[in-house]
Amino acid sequence: AQKVTQAQTEISVVEKEDVTLDCVYETRDTTYYLFWYKQPPSGELVFLIRRNSFDEQNEISGRYSWNFQKSTSSFNFTITASQVVDSAVYFCALSNAGGTSYGKLTFGQGTILTVHP
Amino acid sequence: GAGVSQSPSNKVTEKGKDVELRCDPISGHTALYWYRQSLGQGLEFLIYFQGNSAPDKSGLPSDRFSAERTGGSVSTLTIQRTQQEDSAVYLCASSLTGQTYNEQFFGPGTRLTVL
């Protein structure tokens, strides 16, 4: 079985603060993919990043960065200098690559991020 | 259109009625997924289509739920004899293939309210 845990239900920050969203996962598979999605108030899930289990390099994209640590089964997401437009629900998700996984996503419960002006 | 579309955007129904939810995936995407988002359960996988076949229906919560896909394109999720616990947002996603590394593109969802 696989599981994704986002322990932070809600986070509130003031604009320009840095914020880190935690994600811990469980899987028995050795090959898997991890994802982050953003769900703004409009409701549509927006893909942010994909990382495979063999690539532990951290990634930075503008104000966003991701820290993947296999040793702790974590895939944390940091927003630097947060902005009001970053306010959304953020989901971490896991998909196993082997066998008949078909790309099915297992999601965490989501973290509601509110950035105040 | 360029993205995944779903209809209706909102559906209010009475307990015991049947409902049909529609998903139009991105053209050329062979894989289609249905998920459900509810307050108590978060985002859950329901069913996966590859073309018109559904090799994974493991997330359908009961036999009141069924889905089909025709022409390798449009999919319909049907809920029979709706119950209040079926109230949720039903999300559809498509991807180029069913490979794990393919990004899934999500539609805006159908918000179902069962009175």
Image (tube, coloured by chain):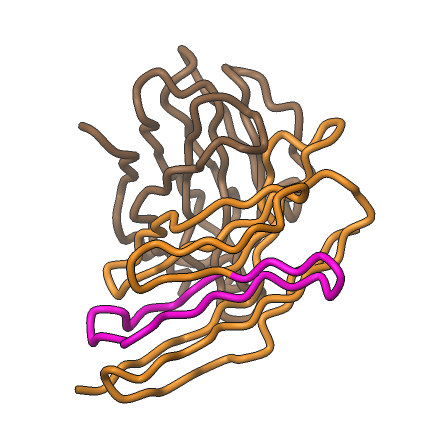
Chain colours: A orange, B brown
Residue A72 appears left or right of A114:
right
Figure quadrant of residue B59: top right
Write the residue at 53% across / 80% down. A8
Residue A16, above or below B8: below
Work out which residue is located at the far top of the displayed protein and give it.
Answer: B71
Write the residue at 70% across / 58% down. A3
Look at the image and say whether residue B50 sits in the magenta stretch: no
Q: Residue A110: x, y in percent?
A: 49, 68
Residue A79, above or below B83: below
Q: Which residues are magenta?
A: A67-91
The quadrant of the image that shows the C terminus of chain B is bottom left
Q: How many marks?
A: 0
Residue A109, above or below B47: below
Q: Residue B99: x, y in percent?
A: 57, 26
Figure quadrant of residue B93: top left
Write the residue at 47% across / 29% down. B32
Q: Which residue occupies the foreground of this view, B84 or B54?
A: B54
Residue B65 appears left or right of B30:
right
Q: Residue A2: x, y in percent?
A: 74, 53
Q: Which residue occupies the foreground of this view, A65 or A43?
A: A65
Write the residue at 82% across / 48% down. A28
